[in-house]
Amino acid sequence: EVAKDDTVSVSLRANFNNVTNESQTHASYTMSLYSVSANSVGGADLTTVTTPGSGDVGVDGNGGVATGLVGNNIVVYKTVPTLASVALESTTLVNATMEVYKFSVSADQNGAVSWGSITLDVSGQRGSSAVANLSNPLNGFNYTTMALYDSAGEAVAATFTTSSVSNNYLIISLTNVETVGAGASETYKVEASLTGFEGGNSFAIRVRDYTTAHQNPQTLANAKADANGDASEGSFVWSDNSGATESTAASHWFVGRDIPGLDTSIVTVTKPAGSN
């Protein structure tokens, strides 16, 4: 019962079956209002509106059809990752090898998450020049000397390249995919050899933002190519392992808006003014 001049919100909940193979992952669902029947207290039906297949019906204050009664799109995966920025040991810039970015990858309780590449957005100031062309080691951000480490301090084999979209986008592509177990988390750090930065200079790094909608599952190679070659594509290539675990050929790899916990907060490292 809804009192006069009042509003009542109704929530509908659903339980989805577990994803057991790659053909079931990335299933998309949208719930919408199909029909409405309204009664006055102690009276007869005021109106009933039923529009089969329209998915967009309702009753407005005058007994007419109200629009916009469609729920949010729901995309179902076997498991989903959460990616978060982690505080650096130091945000004081030095012309030496130092930790420049740190992040964690976590899997939910439903299953292990694998990942194959991540794209960072780098900007800043070195001397009188912006850190814009990462392909030029003379700008002080020599990506050819960069390295990735896990939480145990072990080197993770990876290649560091600039994106074909922008030299500000630094792609870290793993030689072998990393897998984080169900309910677990792993922290990674990026180190770089820095040169030529002066007092007052700084640089900022964050996970590259994205603008695309959910994408269909694909192979690891195709997902990496999409992340590299399109300015609107995502920044983190991952798998819910709905097919064979860690399989790079299976079509269960994603990129784009498929990460509910993607942290794109900016990490800034600064060289104090007056320092050498």
Image (tube, helix red, strand yellow):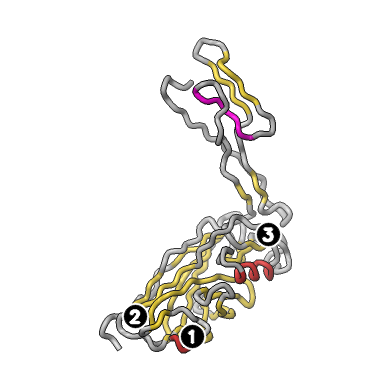
Does the segment drawn in magenta span residue 253? no
Q: Position of residue 103 (x, y in %)?
A: 48, 69
Which label was assigned to residue 201? 2
Q: Picture coordinates of residue 210 (x, y %)?
A: 53, 62
Secondary structure type for disc 1? strand
Q: Quadrant of the C terminus?
A: bottom left
At a point 71% along the width and 53% down the height, the residue shown is: 20
Badge number at residue 142: 1
Residue nearer the viewer, 102 or 47: 47
Q: Quadrant of residue 47?
A: top right
Amino acid type shown at disc 2: Asn
Magenta segment: does it hold 60?
A: yes
Tell me, yes or no, if residue 34 can be seen here: yes
- Mark 3 is on which residue type? Pro
Spatial distance from mark 2 to mark 1, Cα to Cα?
16 Å
What residue sits right under mark 3 in the picture?
217
Which residue is depicted at the point 52% across and 68% down? 186
Could you classify mark 1 by the number of other residues whose Cα lies within 10 Å: few (under 14), some (14-19), or many (20 or more)?
some
Front-most of residues 242 and 97: 97
Sooner in the amino-acid sequence: mark 1 or mark 3:
1
Which residues make up the magenta segment?
A: 55-61
